[in-house]
Amino acid sequence: MEIIHKQDEDSGKFQIMDGQNTAGQIFYSWLGKDRIVINHTEVEPAYNGQGIGKQLVYQVVEFAREKQVNVVPLCTFAKRIFEKSEEIRDVL
């Protein structure tokens, strides 16, 4: 599987591709210059239970660390991942 990142000035998304199929994607938007808001995470039903959603959240965390910005998880799925995973709370 391959991870693709697409972005413009105001928003972006990470996609996990399985060949030509999108296994899952996570959407974010910029809130000023120092915060990213995770708006929505979706995983195709055929890929449920494979950790795709969690992997997408971790991609946003890695991106936030690189950019030295904080993350606001509005998406309920992403919020649960942050609550369960202490090692990523440093970007909140």
Image (tube, rainbow, N blue to C red):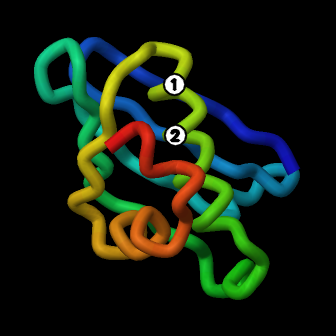
Q: Is residue 24 above or below residue 29?
A: below
Residue pointed to by mark 1? 65
Residue 55 is left or right of residue 76, and the answer is right
Looking at this view, is 58 or 42 the one in front?
A: 58
Looking at this view, is 54 or 92 the one in front?
A: 92
Residues under numbered marks 1 and 2 in contact, where contact means CB atoms less than 8 Å apart: yes
Whole-Å distance between the Cαs marked 1 and 2? 6 Å
Residue 52 is left or right of residue 69, and the answer is right
Number of residues whose C-alpha sits closer than 10 Å to that of mark 2, classed few (under 14), some (14–19) or many (20 or more): many
* Position in image of residue 91 (x %, y %): 40, 38
Residue 43 is left or right of residue 12, and the answer is right
SS class, disc 1? helix
SS class, disc 2? helix
Residue found at x 55% / y 17%: 66
* Position in image of residue 22 (x %, y %): 67, 57
Any mark on residue 61, and which? Answer: 2
Residue 67 is left or right of residue 53, and the answer is left
Callout 2, which amino acid? Val
Q: Which image quadrant is residue 21 in?
A: bottom right
Residue found at x 73% / y 40%: 3
Residue found at x 78% / y 78%: 50
* Position in image of residue 52 (x %, y %): 69, 66
Looking at this view, is 67 or 83 the one in front?
A: 83
Any mark on residue 10, and which? Answer: none
Q: Which image quadrant is residue 70 in?
A: top left
Residue found at x 22% / y 60%: 74
